[in-house]
Image (cartoon, rainbow, N blue to C red):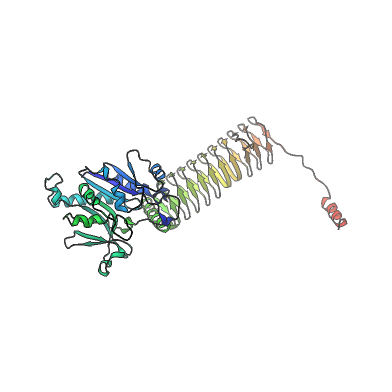
Amino acid sequence: MRLKAVILAAGKGTRFKSEKPKVLHKILGKPMIFYVKSAVEWVNPEEIIFIVGHKKDEVIKEINCDSCKFVEQKHQLGTGHAVIQAIKYFKDFDGYILIINGDTPLIKGETLKEAINYLQALINYEGRNIKDKNYQNKEIAGLILTATVENPYGYGRIVKEKAGVVEKIVEEKDASFTEKQIKEVNSGIYIVYAPYLKEALEKLNNNNAQKEYYLTDIVKILKEEDKKFYTFNVGDPTQILGVNDRWQLSQAENILKNQFIYFWALNGTTFHNPETIYIEFDATFGKDIEIFQGCSIKGNTEIDDGTIIYENCVIKNCKIGKNVKIYPNTVIEDSIIEDNAEIGPFARIRNNTVIGKNVSIGNFVEIKNSTVGENTTAKHLTYLGDAEIGKNVNIGAGTITCNYDGVKKHKTVIKDNAFIGSDTMLVAPIIIGENAYTGSGSVITKDVPDNALAVERTPLKIIENYSKRKKNKDEQSC
């Protein structure tokens, strides 16, 4: 079956109360339109046509599809009016048009594929072929994707004839008492034979209270010409959930997140208290992984086998190696953590940092734009910025790389097997040699050679009987 797709993405989304176009609001790190486009691409249409309008340049940039076509709907005059804008792309097309709203992010590509196969089966069953000379008089007009819901309030109802052919779609405000009892509802997704669609669109009018051109009217128009619509029930009603405000956005995100967690749980990851865990679309997980409550796994993050991430951690755009332990309340961004490392609790790793194998980074340690070699430890209260740190280095508590002179950042190099004493200030640019030591409390401003000890301290001064003299002085001043 030949197929083109039209995705409606022109809406402003007034109920979002936002300057951002509705379809660009994000779900699990991706704009809503991404999920619709991905589902449509699953069925491999010959062409994808986006109807854009409000802040169209932003929408086109985010969609980022050179092979797609973009048509502007300058005035928001209804769904039918939106599709009319795309007529030029299918006016001579002898195939079917998939029409879908850009605010239905939960629809699955597999579902669209099943619907297309079902439509093809209907065509075959009736013994018709689109090449038949009598096709225009006898062929099925198309398919409406529907769902059965317990509470159909607010949805358009699908009214059918006895043979299962759709008689009409009735909106909530226009439905009779009997029609309101119908639980099969319209998804807003259609697959329509292009010549019939063009014919019906040309007959649309806006004779209604809203003065809009409704796409649903094509069913009635084509039925009057003995062109038949059938339905395909998607099964899971959440797939047709439209997102019209921020609460519905939250609902859609929660549904999709649970689907992702379920998928990864079946593939080897344990999620403790999963309703409290947030994972985004691009995150991937290996086997024998444990994620504890309150964690957020964001962006393009890859977590390898055997890793444990404890409570309330945030990990974004990172590659986490095998058998890593990340302790509670740790934040890691844009970094690589290699195998068997231990990070946290309360650590922060960021800006293209690479933590080597078997490294131990402890509580209240921040590392920025640095590399840390294998078996190195920085256990407590440390800042390492713009640093290159070798293997088997000990970083004492309170160590700071003083990397910024008020104008630009400078690099600190600490070579293999160095020992940095507690409360050391390393004033960059500086190099600490192999097997070198720095004394606790030192401010190091010059390079330290291999095997050397650098100590910089003010001599200790002890004042005898200070407290007694101070007390007497205080009493005299009263």
Is residue 349 visible in this depiction of the protein?
yes
Relative to 376, 454 lies left or right: right
- At 13% from the left and 52% from the top, the residue drawn is 126
Quarter of the image where the N terminus is located: top left
**Is 178 in front, or is 149?**
178
Which x, y percent locates residue 360?
A: 54, 43
Name the foreground residue: 168 vs 455: 168
Image check: 248 left or right of 430?
left
Q: Is residue 288 visible from the viewing direction of this image? A: no
Q: Is residue 133 left or right of residue 266?
A: left
At 86% from the left edge and 53% from the top edge, which residue is drawn?
473
1 vs 474, left or right, is left
Along the viewing direction, whichever of 271 and 126 lies nearer the viewer: 126
Q: Residue furthest right?
A: 476
| In this view, 165 is above or below 26 | below
Looking at the picture, how far across and down is residue 450, in whole percent?
63, 30
How many marks on residues?
Answer: 0
Quadrant where the image shows the C terminus: bottom right
Q: Which residue is farthest bottom?
A: 177
